[in-house]
Image (cartoon, coloured by chain):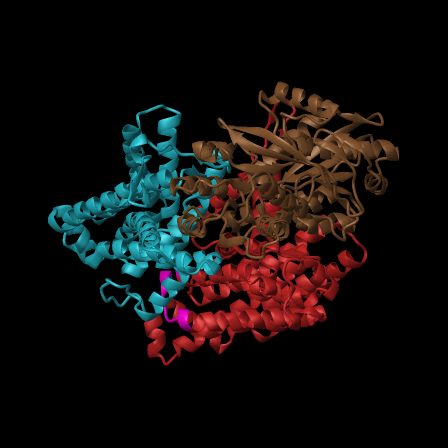
Amino acid sequence: MFKKLGFAVLALALIAFPLAGCGGGDDDVIRIGVYEPMTGVNAAGGEMTVEGIELANELFPEILGKQIEIIVVDNKSEPQEAANAVSRLIDRDNVHAIIGSYGSSLSMAGGPVAEEAGIPVVGCSPTNPLVTLGNDYYFRVCFIDPFQGTVMANYAVNELGAKTAAIIKDVTQDYSVGLSNFFKQAFVELTGDADSIVAEINYNTGDQDFTPQLQTAKAANPDVIFAPGNYAESALLIKQAREADITVPILGGDTWEAPDFLDVGGDAVEGVVYSTHFTAQAPVTARSNEFLDAYRNKFGAEANAFAALGYDAYLVILDAIERANSHDPGDIRDALADTQIFEGATGIITLDENGDATKSAIINTVENGEFVYLTTVHP
Amino acid sequence: MKIGKIHLHKHCLLTIGSTLLLLVAIILVSEFRLLDAYKVRVLNLCAIYVILGLSMNLTLGYGGLLALGTAGFMCVGAYISALLTMSPEQKVANFFLEPIVPWLANVEVAFVIAIIAAGIGAAIFGFVIGAPALKLRGDYLAIATLGFAEIIRVVFTNTQSLTNGALGLKGIPSHTNLYWSWGLAILAVILARTMVTSSYGRAFKAIRDDQTAAEAMGINLFKHKVTIFVISAFMAGIGGALMGNLIVTVNPTFFRFMLTFQVLLIAVIGGLGSISGTVIAGIIVTIATEWLRIFESPMDLGFMRIPGIPGMRMVIFAVLLMAVIIFWRQGLMGRTEVSWERTFAFLNRVRTRFQSGRGVGQ
Amino acid sequence: MSGTEFTQHIFNGIALGSLYALIAIGYTMVYGILRLINFAHGEILMSAMFFAMFGVTLFSLPWPVAFLLAILLTAAFGISIERMAYRPLRNAPRISVLISAIGVSFLLQNLGLVVFGARPKAFPRPDMFNQLWHLGDVSVLSLNLYIPIFTVLLLIGLTWFINKTRTGMAMRAASKDLDTARLMGIDVDKIISITFGIGSALAAFGGIMWAMKYPSIHPLVGLFPGLKCFIAAVVGGIGNVPGAMLGGFILGVGEIMLVAFMPELSGYRDAFAFVLLIFILLAKPTGILGEKTAEVKS
């Protein structure tokens, strides 16, 4: 009897609370929602990005004389949760603009919700071309996979003198599949040899044993191995490659830039090369230095690319609000679409007709357990 | 439970009346935008989880079969509906790495057809999987169905020209609204209710309670098990289709077996063998998942600030699940149903208690 | 494919297979007595990895001490899981216990996410296991040679224990018929606790080896080894210790060979284990070495 009554009360409370709604309608505050993966497979990327956004918020807490509040929501690295998170930010928290999300599939789930509600979103690091395509409300401050894949193919052919390459990709990650494909196209074009990709082998997220894939790649005797993927799997893969006596250069993409990649990979990841958005060692703008100093002060470490992108996403929105002289979501969107030669921490940002940033890529390597800058590639 | 003729009549009217009331509520909410998009989204998810929970409860609560293939059937349903409702232009944009198979490229049908196709497609998969797997019993069935679901996911990841592989599908039309989700949820309740009250249903209960005895009574075990399994797959497929057209993007990684566990949670908390329990649990769990976010964001208690802990929600759910399994084995409703008689009796008891309580006070 | 290459694949397959075998034995022992798929086995594995890692990194213990402590701690952990989550359901339908096991797995994963965080952590690999040996053209990590040796030694020890000791005899009796064993004066609860203790200790040992071979640990790390080792146990014949070993090797070598001979199918590797499982379940439900029981087929 009491059990049932208890249940009924609990049920009522559960239903009543969220429906009561408590989002602020306060017009003196500008609210920027953030949906990032704080748990799940992409947690590291989400955490790093949020650090940058929070730092930016501390440094620039006001615009147009109004306070800016950021509201961070976890999307659990799941598309359904990402869509819920965006919807929640819009309807419950009444945000004026949104930042997110690490992981293209998460951004693709959040995008339509924001578009329908007419709230602009600025992505930090979703690099899949589909994220902004056909969505007038989605922008991003990073470059996209076709560019990144081409950059790495160029590096392999021109800098390393590679004539053949093996690709080992995570077939469950859109990021890895897309990047591999663009790398392949560019590599074949550059070498002029349709057979220059000597092996193309797959694995799945969560796999820990890559020995047969690596043996197969080794047997094909490539000049380089291109293996983009989550840093967790990639670190293990590279470790096992070195244990299997594979000595050729291993190349990857921007996801590798995480402290955990170095921790897990240890000595094995020395000398790997990857493309990224930003490096602390080659600050490109005055903003970069400002950001790096602030980051060092706050976290006592060198900043990573994802924090820098989070920082830039926040600033790009602020810039749009300032230019629009309004924090109406529609006005912010229009101003965002006009973003040109904006000086961010990660470089000069100009958003093209799709809402994508045309930007330089940085190529980094690992030396003595640290990410070290190699070169910059302009679009 | 014997119900007199007059009572039945009255209760029937009440049931029809309350269903109509629910429909009116749905119409009001939809047409006059009484709730914002976020709440509507959560209500849609509630209905979807009710359907999925019912699908799980049919096999587990009534059939006594622990089948863990829900995520796989949802995956089939979601992809079928997505591919059938997407416009040809969207398909071209999506399949930019490898073109879609020609026979699917120009197909675009109404949502109702897509939903039915999704259900039937999942049911066919259910039959293909169920026919061999249902020869197994208990834990073996659980692990075999889980295995089949994983195989479906892996195959969908790798067949790029059919499903776009890991890139997923984007720009699926957002057909799912309260009419569709709750309409189908009501139909699912009716279907489940019809199933379990039919002679089929009685046979299922007999199988659940004692398989050997049921067989001795002349019940064709295999036929019954396959039937219930296929219907369950059908419902999961429809749930998946609704989900896909709600989130408007699908991706094979979404359909990992953690999703099945989430559905299992609903069925267990609601009470195995209770339709109304599943409905209530589906609504509560879905809403609570959103509501419990407050534990993950920083809380300001005025005198101190508690930092949010991401992931706390799922811990709370897991603890709740364990508590139900160990101490409250019947779940919310056990094997009973919410009925008007019980509701009135309950309300009467509450009233008497209330009055007698006041009486003591005077 | 050249001979060297093939040998290399075989070596890799045996190393992976013996890891599967090690963990599968724990599954098989628990199943043999309780007829329960301990879904939480993978999470016990994960806990052991974290215990061992914290022993080495946080408390700076020498690795043999840290590993041993982790194994003991995990055994105790396994026993307490059985007490809290399975024992109260001893008289409930089997399906309830199975759901409880899934619940424990769900709880431990999410608890792990909150306590340890989702980001992967490096697992220390002692020098002894970190040598790269060259046998002709084949390169082998010393760890990969130690793992099969440990597995075989443990298997011999375990077989002796089950067949020659009083406790082992009681375990065998309990696995034949729990109720009769109880009537014969065997303290069934104690035997079940011991089984869980041994099973979890083996899982811990396997988990630590796993973490050394694949030194990146996070709260969901036990998920796939847990599932695959269960499959190995079923393939070999669940409830049968040498069967678990055989199943582990078949699965390990099979997975490696699938990728080796058909690289274009490498994306399907995770499905291989399940296809094998379903094939075995349908063809010979008791597994390769399993005894005939009435339980499996309806």
Q: Colour of chain C?
A: cyan
Q: Which residues are magenta?
A: B132-143
Is B141 part of what is drawn in magenta? yes
C256 above or below C127? below
At which x and y percent is residue B17? 69, 66
The chain coloured red is B
Foreground of the two, C181 or B160: B160
- The quadrant of the rendering that contains the N terminus of chain C is bottom left
Q: In this image, B317 relative to B102: left or right?
A: left
Give the total of numbered labels.
0
Q: Residue B68 appears at what percent x and percent y?
A: 46, 60
Does any portion of residue C298 appear in the rendered image?
no
Q: Nearer the viewer, residue B253 or B288?
A: B253
Question: Which residue: 65% across, 24% down?
Answer: B302
Q: Along the line of sight, which residue is nearer the eye, C275 or A166?
A: A166
Q: Quadrant of residue B3?
A: bottom right
Chain colored brown: A
| Residue C98 falls within the magenta-colored stretch | no
The furthest residue to the right: A325
Reply above or below: B140 against C169: below
Q: Is residue C18 left or right of residue B134?
A: left
Q: Main secondary structure of the magenta part?
A: helix
